[in-house]
Amino acid sequence: MAGVLRNMFMLAVASSLAAAASAEKTHEPPELFRNLLNCRAIADSAARLACYDQSTSALEQAEAKKDLVVVDRKQIRETKKSLFGFTLPKIGLFGGSGDEKADEKDEVVELESSVEAVRPIGGGNFSLRLAKDAGTWETMSTINDAPRSGDKVRIRKAMLGSYLGQVGINRGVRFRRVE
C-alpha cells in the first residue's frame, strides 16, 4: 500500500513538473528575423549576400506594412513609464524576456511629475492631470491642503496593487490612475 501511494505521489509530482515546464513560454523570434540569422550559415559568399539582401528587404517591407515592429529597450522603458498605474494584461509585449535582471531594471516603480490641472471630485479628493504625459490620477485619501497647478507629485507602487505618494505638502496620499 505504501509503495502504491509513493508511486502515485511521484507520478503527481512528475506530471505537475511537466505541466510547469510546458507552461513556461520561450521567446521565439519572428520567422523573418530567423531567416536573416540563418543566412550566416551559408558558406558561399555570393549566396550568403543574396540571402542577406532578400531577408533585409523582407524585414523592411514587413516593418513598412506594420507586420513587424522593432523597438529598443529605451522605447520599452518609456512606454512602461507612460502606462505606470494601469493594470495591463500579461501579453509579453513589455517584459517576460526571460532575463529577470533586465526585466527588473526596466520595471517602473515610481513616477515624478507636476500637477498640470486640478479638479475637486468630492469628499476631500481631487482629480489631478499630470505633466509629462503622466496621465490623470485621482486621490483616494482626504487631502487637507488642496493641490495646486505646479505642485510636485511623486507616486510609487505600494502593496496589493495600490499607489501611494505625495502631492505638494500632502504626504501618504493614496492614488489611482484613471486616464
Image (cartoon, rainbow, N blue to C red):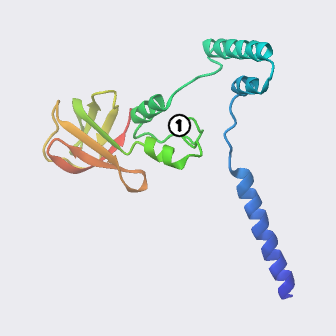
The x and y percentages for residue 50 are 76, 12
Q: Quadrant of residue 68?
A: top right
Q: Quadrant of the N terminus?
A: bottom right
The residue sitting at 72% across, 28% down in the picture is 34
What is the quadrant of residue 66 in the picture?
A: top right
What residue is rendered at 44% in x and 39% in y? Answer: 86
State how many labels appear.
Answer: 1
Position of 74 compared to 133: left or right? Answer: right
| Rendered position, 118 above or below 43 | below
Provide the residue designation for mark 1: 94
> Looking at this view, is 35 or 177 the one in front?
35
| Quadrant location, the C terminus | top left
**For residue 145, what is the image quadrant?**
top left
Q: Residue at x 84, y 77 (%)?
A: 7
Give the class, few, some or many, for how many residues have Cα within 10 Å of label 1's Cα (few <14, many ≥20). some
Task: Relative to 167, say whether 44 is above or below.
Answer: above
- Is residue 77 visible from the viewing direction of this image? yes
Image side of residue 105 versus residue 19, left or right = left
In the rendered structure, which amino acid carries the disc numbered 1? Phe
Q: Is residue 26 above or below residue 3?
A: above
Q: Is residue 117 visible?
A: no
**1 relative to 135 in the view: left or right:** right
